[in-house]
Amino acid sequence: MNQPNTKPKRRKTSLKWKWAFFTSIGVLAIVVIFSCLIFNRFTNVLFQQERSHIDNTLSTVSSRLTNYASPLTKSDVGHYLKPKITDSNDQVTQADGNDLYSNSLIVNFSRDNILVNVYSVNGKELFESRKSTAKFYSASKRKIFTTRHNGHQILVGSEPLLSKKNGSLIGYAQVTDQLDNYRATANKLLVILIILVLISVLLTMIFAYILAQELLRPINDIQKTINEVKSDPDSDARVPAFRSNDELTDLAQLLNGMLDQTQRYIDQQQQFVEDVSHELRTPVAVIQGHIDMLLRWGKDDPEVLEESLKASLQETNRMKSLVSEMLDLSRAEQIEINYGEEITDVNQVFEQVYNDFKMIHPDFTFTFDDDTDHDVYVKIYRNHLEQVLVILLDNAIKYSTKRKEVHLSLSTSMAMVNIAVQDFGEGISEEDKQKVFNRFYRVDKARSRDKGGNGLGLSIAHRLIEAYHGNISIESSLGSGSIFQINLPILQHLPSEEEMEKKTSSTSKEQSEDSGLPEGILDTSKHDDRPLNDDEHHEK
């Protein structure tokens, strides 16, 4: 039997170690480059010093030996370059009587890595400061160059000796620097720099690990919160507030906001199920009762049969309306996700709804006061603004009594646009005003059912307006009517005319397609995003 192919689990590498490692690599590269620059610069200085020693030695030898007019001999060179010791006080002197130790040439001779040679015109060695196997290099003028000898790099300075009296060639002077001191100093510097590099990398790794551990501590809190929420979706665990105001703080706040939003959606889903099950229980029980009665004995009685069918059909239509409104309310809970960037011309929508209701309800008197100087734009989905206006106007008409009159007004104040809908109907008491925006709340349940309401219209309007960062309020008096007011923030930075025309045409087309009517005509009985006949002005 073939074993299933399973990929080996990759070994987990801590982010702290990665951070420490790559930080150390970066520091290593920087320190190495910096050390190389220091080493190169320092060795160049040392090398120039060695060249300077050779040049000074050549100048000194040349000044001593160019007084001769004829080619140099071994005795001539020895007379000027070899010291003499007197027997009286063992004083070391030179041929010219000067103290030997004060002479720069002899000081250079005393250096272990310096070798001075003098050659005749034909290249025969006349003088050497110490025993060696130096090679003769002839030159037409003073020249200092590097070459290799016995596998090591050496520095050689060669110069022809010209007589000061007649300018003729009398011999050659050559100074060879074995560069032993130079190499020893360079090697010491190299060892010091290597030790410094290793110490720097080690300290950097330790510091980077400690720093990463401290900086990543908030991530551990975030991971802990995520695991708690994963194990218990109903958990109220949240990332604790961080003292540092940085990107991780923003991430924690974003995560907390997402968890809060997710919790709201879970609560809304539970509330939706509870509300639907509660409200559907009565119509389902009514339909079931009529069907049971028909099955037992009612189907043989035409009057009972007709009455039961009508009642069942009425309850079925009510359930259909209820489900439609509940879906509208559920969609309103997710406006931030689906309609966050929609822009609407308030004046245009307000005037359209006003004209539609004048046409649909000719028995009512509608007045429209527009106090705005120019078109006002807000961030709201056009259909949602229409839906709210239709809910308020439908309620105003539904609960008007003898005075069939509705007043509408549109105005601006500061950075807000105000919309008001006033009726002269039954009015609402102070106690009920606090609850009219609750789900399924009706002031007079019996009368609300007669008017076809489920108690969701104002809840939908309230949720829609709040989702777009506005507010809706009510002023009412029993027997005098009510005024519903909506305030929405005005969009300060208006879009271009081309963008507005595009948005207007697209939303108008969507409205026409959804309603099945020509553009500009509002269907108050059925619409894609709003229930138009089930909203209660006096819901309870």
Image (cartoon, rainbow, N blue to C red):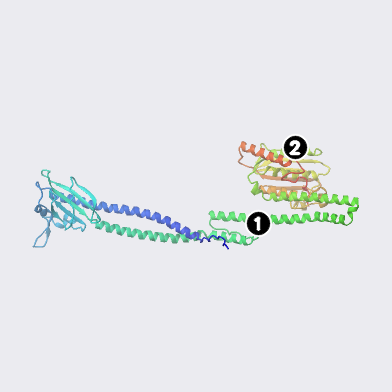
Residue 181 is drawn in which quadrant?
bottom left
Q: Is residue 124 left or right of residue 495?
A: left
**Residue 480 in the image, given as x and y percentages of width and height:** 80, 45
**Residue 362 in the image, given as x and y percentages of width and height:** 80, 37
Residue 262 visible = yes
What element does badge 2 sit on? helix
Residue type marked 1: Gln
Q: Please tell me the numbered disc located at residue 263.
A: 1
Query: Total number of numbered labels?
Result: 2
**Residue 148 in the image, given as x and y percentages of width and height:** 24, 53
- Name the residue at 64% across, 46% down: 340
What element does badge 1 sit on? helix
The crowding category of the residue bearing disc 2, from other C-alpha atoms within 10 Å (few below 14, some 14 to 19, many at least 20), is: some
Q: Mark 1 vs mark 2: which is more N-terminal?
A: 1
- Name the residue at 54% across, 55% down: 248
Residue type marked 2: Asn
Q: Is residue 375 left or right of residue 175?
A: right
Q: Which residue is mark 2?
A: 355
How far is the residue under mark 1 from the one under mark 2? 42 Å
Q: Is residue 394 left or right of residue 299?
A: left
The crowding category of the residue bearing disc 1, from other C-alpha atoms within 10 Å (few below 14, some 14 to 19, many at least 20), is: some
355 relative to 92, above or below: above
Residue furthest out toward the front:
1
Q: Are marks 1 and 2 in contact (CB under 8 Å)?
A: no
